[in-house]
Amino acid sequence: MSTLLTSRTFRFARQLQSMVQARRFTVLAIETSCDDTSVALLHSPPHSPSIATLLAHKILTCPNRIYGGIHPLASLQFHRRNLMPLLQSLEISQKPDLIAVTRGPGMLAALATGIDTAKGLSVAWGIPLIGVHHMQAHALTPRLVAALNGGEDGVEFPFMTLLVSGGHTILLESRGLTSHKILAETIDIALGDMVDKCARRLLPEEVMDSYPEAVSYGAALEKFCFPEKEPEYAYHPGKTPERKQEDEEKVKRWGEWKLCRPLTKNEKVRFSDAFSFCGLGSTLDRYFSMKDGGPESISVEERKALGREVMMVAFEHVASRIVTALEASQTPPSALVISGGVAANKFLKNILSNYLSHNGHNIRIAIPPQKYCTDNAAMVAWAGLEMYRSGYISAPTVTPVRKWSLDNDTYYGVSDIDCEAGDKNGPGGVLGISGWVKREVEGR
């Protein structure tokens, strides 16, 4: 009798486990917006929206060192060669419930590779498709991380997001899943682009040669300036006695670098809603070209000091805009989320936390793990899942878009070839372009 009960209990447990697994909602995600080809498979219980399991996640990056940066055609060919093998490597045994794919913004041809593949799979499997806003996915990444940790330490709306990468520098207020307001954005190049360009100027050739072809220049510069054996991430805000002493010691040892302090002289630009980084890189180039003895005469130690100075000036510029936004905010944000490739920079986090605290803002700073900071399909899967559960899918005619603002007050017209025009009387931002289909929410 005891053996019989044990056997029945075991079979019942197996059946219950099978039923629970069958009720899981599975998302297949594809990311091809720039030079990273990524796929992911995410599970989430239908009635536990704050919990998720990442079954598989793979990323390949196009080798870019030979081009001195991202090359659109090389990236496109890389996506074409690697996307299908990556999908095959997932060994999907059952068709997913939803396909999420990055729709924009990004490089149009690269996006099209992912979109066309996702549309084909959607038709073949007979499952819905959702085109994800790339920057929305970055902003929601801390919510993904919380879901993967069983729902712990999630970020609730409203929160503020700093999106910093090689292509974007945006300070964003996220009031809801599809309600966002851009508080500041770059008027020229992105922060990551500027750091990469300065890195190619500052890093000695022997250091660059030690890295693989698919190198992140900004990460290489950080490692060069802050060696693991001596991680000197110490930072003192401006106008403090410690900072004054540091500045005097730098001038005494290296002389005047005269690096540009962004937007400190241009009265035509409203300081509170703009970032600018091109001038900082230009003054670094000028210093190298005018150096007595040429660039070769600049020692390794001075290159490290210059790299730290460039990053500090740029990161303080970013921090000043965050302080202004916090002081103007009517509803205090629950957290400051830092996402995008540059979010992996530890010096950035150290400067922001100290700068904000020095100015009386002790806000929680949420930074996802490094593997989720760069472009990846896991964040696309989660963003797609959140949008799906809110009642949205994409039409079969959905197309990639190069420009797509998160700001609710941004609309696109019929004549704008970079984007699918939306309804002028409808919402802007995430929902401000065509291709959305409203569905009935059935508990998912």
Image (cartoon, rainbow, N blue to C red):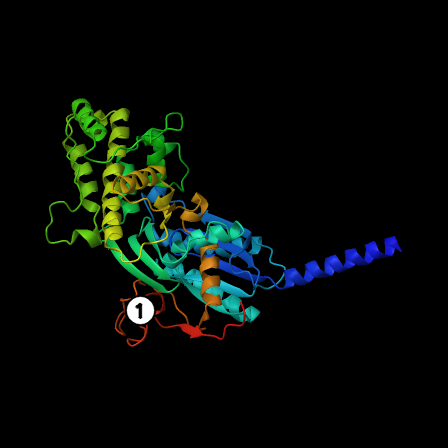
Residue 85, given in percent of the width and then of the height, sits at 53, 54
233 on left or right of 384 = left
**Residue 402 in view:** no
* Quadrant of the rendered image containing residue 353: top left
Tell me which residue sits at (39%, 56%) in the image: 33
In the current view of this chain or complex, which residue is farthest to the top?
253
* Quadrant in which the N terminus is drawn: bottom right
Residue 183, given in percent of the width and then of the height, sits at 26, 56
85 on left or right of 412 = right
Residue pointed to by mark 1: 428
The answer to which of 52 and 260 lies nearer the viewer is 52
Residue 266, given in percent of the width and then of the height, sits at 11, 49
Tell me which residue sits at (14%, 45%) in the image: 264
Q: Amino acid at mark 1?
A: Gly
Indicate whether 419 appears above or below 143: below
Indicate whether 285 appears above or below 175: above
Indicate whether 66 appears above or below 435: above
Tell me which residue sits at (33%, 51%) in the image: 163
* Quadrant of the rendered image containing residue 201: top left
The answer to which of 69 and 338 lies nearer the viewer is 338
The answer to which of 338 and 113 lies nearer the viewer is 338
Tell me which residue sits at (34%, 35%) in the image: 222
Count residues near mark 1 (Cα–Cα under 10 Å), then give few for <14, some for 14-19, many for 20+. many
Residue 57, given in percent of the width and then of the height, sits at 52, 51
Indicate whether 46 appears above or below 201: below
Callout 1: helix, strand or loop? loop
* Quadrant of the rendered image containing residue 92: bottom right
**Residue 182 in view:** yes
